[in-house]
Amino acid sequence: MGTQAEIPLCLGLVAHVDAGKTTLSEQLLVHSGVLRRGGRVDHGDAFMDGHALERARGITIFCEQASFDLPRGDGRTVHVTLMDTPGHVDFSGEMERALSVLDMAVLIVSCAEGVQSHTVTLMRLLKARSIPTLIFLNKTDREGADVPRVMEQMRRLLSEDCVLMTQDKALLREELAARDEELMERHLEENAQRGDYLAGARRAMQAGLLYPVLSGSALMDTGVDTLMQAVAALAQEPDAARLDAPFAAKVYRVAHRDGMRYCYVKAIAGRLHARETAQTLAGEEKVNAIFHPQGAKLTVIPELCAGETAVLTGLSCRPGEYIGADVGRENQALVPLMSVDVQPEQGLENTKLLAHLRELEEEDPLLSVRAEQGRVSVGIMGAVQIEVLGSVLFSRFGDRVSFLPPKVMYRETIAAPAVGIGHYEPLRHYAEAWLRLVPGEPGCGVTFADRTPPNQLALNWRRLIAQHVGEREHPGVLTGSPLTDVRVELIAGRAHLKHTEGGDFREATYRAIRNALMQAENVLLEPVVRFELAFAPDVLSRVTGELIRLGAELDAPDYGEDEVRLCGSCTAAQFWDYPQQFAATTRGHGRSSTRFDRYAPCKNQDAAVREMGYSALADERNPAGSVFCSHGAGYYVPWDEVRSHAHCEVEEPC
């Protein structure tokens, strides 16, 4: 942020696939002077879709960005960082990472197709993150485009606060005043000026009470200037105090190019100069250089200020991490529900393939790479993502691979409390931890509670155990799937005055959790999705029959004037292929929206465990036994004998 006259604005374009999002982004760059001529996705020359895979497939896969300035009437300049996000549901992870740093969004809706399935999902995400949102009705030049019809549809499916900004001025002012108390007072007194209505609109957008709607055609270059003026006028002024606060930033993207690792960040507060250090989850790390991204081009800049985005080198961070004063990690809301095994071909070694997939996982944590019993698997969001992953492996590393059919990504939990002991005592090392695992509330993940008796274990060691509980996913013992919905309680521990090091309690913690699971009543969980279908009434009985055969639980149908809306839930495995069948049943005229709902006990646990073929005792990377010391040498004690060797005397809680 160069001067107080500049307002930084991170603006994201989001839309259902084929709504015209990338075409609109090209027009914005042309109108702002960044480009002389706009490209098109279908022509393979879009500025923001510079990756060969995007140009070959005609879809946005990676979230690129560009910057430009917009003047506004009060003498201020809005410095816009424009992000063109993927519209295809298979790349929702890339889109959601961009959402996490947006100051404002433009939701593009095709005026020809109306509100589509993914549009509803996007609006739900924007509301959940409280992102002020403008709506642009695109393709008004197309046959069948009907602004009043789509406005009614948006008010019903997206929000009652969708307000058409091109309506009669008196009616528009009434609409704006009704959504902001401060503006309403001045409006009733009949002394409100244009600036008052703009300020009221900004406040209403911030509060989620106003979604301004504009219309036009990006392809025909109509309505673009009006949209840009609205963005500038409605941009919220930043808190000037953020500049004087300690530096803090959010990492929203990681990319590898030409042997370099780039971290894309948005500064939340303070300033950062090149060659300074920043606190990360890995400790203090030096920022080697700061770049300003413009598409694929990077330009060196001297500093990064609050509200701005930049690319940093020298850091080991991953997407979703906070650096600087507020170091930490954001919980990952989106989860892959299915996985595929990746098989190397033509002499490619598993170790090389795994290393390459780990690099891609740094860029997209949703890949959730796992390697066990000679198999390598990744989490996936859909079939198109599988094809793109294969193309990336070949284009970047020369790896030729094949993929096995998708499988469910399970989780594991416990049905009753269990106590586990972890002891780690090779020569000149010592740590012992007693952990009690208690079933938690559904959706709580893995939490920690300190229940150690007073003065038994120093505070620094207890804090270290808490850190080790939360720093990784802990594999269950049924299928090796991640543990969830469990509270881990520290009930006892012991350290040595001379020989205990930090890594000793990491070993003791991991082994204690594993030891408890070996004794627990373990439960396999499978993902359940929540779906919403909209279609013509004449196919209701057929759609209902198809869903019942899948084992879905259905809500009562909601009848509209010309369509039926049917909601319900179903296991992800059963629903995985249904959207294609639904499209055929409705002859392409239905809308479907699916989102993860919860994990529920697997209905066929025994069969699923047998099919996975996982052996907890054969998993050498996750031992349930402990290491004790005798006569100066460490020796291994199996999991079911650890308690008789343990050093702590513990009265276990009820």
Image (spheres, rainbow, N blue to C red):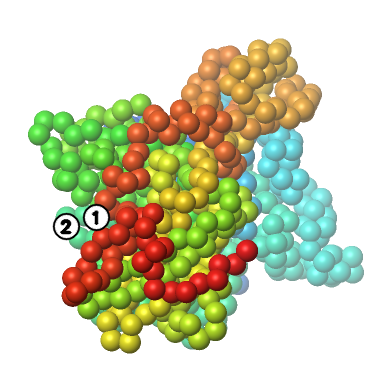
Residue situated in front as seen by the camera: 457 or 573: 457
Instruction: Examine the rendering and report whether any part of residue 202 can be seen.
Output: yes
Name the residue located 24 percent from the left edge and 55 percent from the top edge: 256
Secondary structure under tag 2 reads: loop
Tell me: residue 228, above or below residue 606: below
Residue type beneath disc 1: His
Residue 95's spot in the image, x, y percent?
A: 46, 48
> Position of 511 compared to 447: left or right?
left
- The amino acid beneath tag 2 is Gly
Q: Residue 259 carries which label?
A: 2
Q: Quadrant of residue 178?
A: bottom right
Q: Where is residue 181 in the image (x, y as percent from the top left)?
A: 82, 66
Q: Residue 526 carries which label?
A: none
In this view, the residue in front, 287 or 411, is 411
Q: Whole-percent x and y of residue 437?
A: 52, 59
Q: Quadrant of residue 205?
A: bottom right
Secondary structure beneath disc 1? strand
Tell me the residue that label 1 is attached to. 256
Find residue 571 and report its horizontal and vertical position in percent. Answer: 56, 31
Q: Label 1 to label 2, Cα distance in Å?
A: 7 Å
Q: Residue pushed farthest left?
A: 347
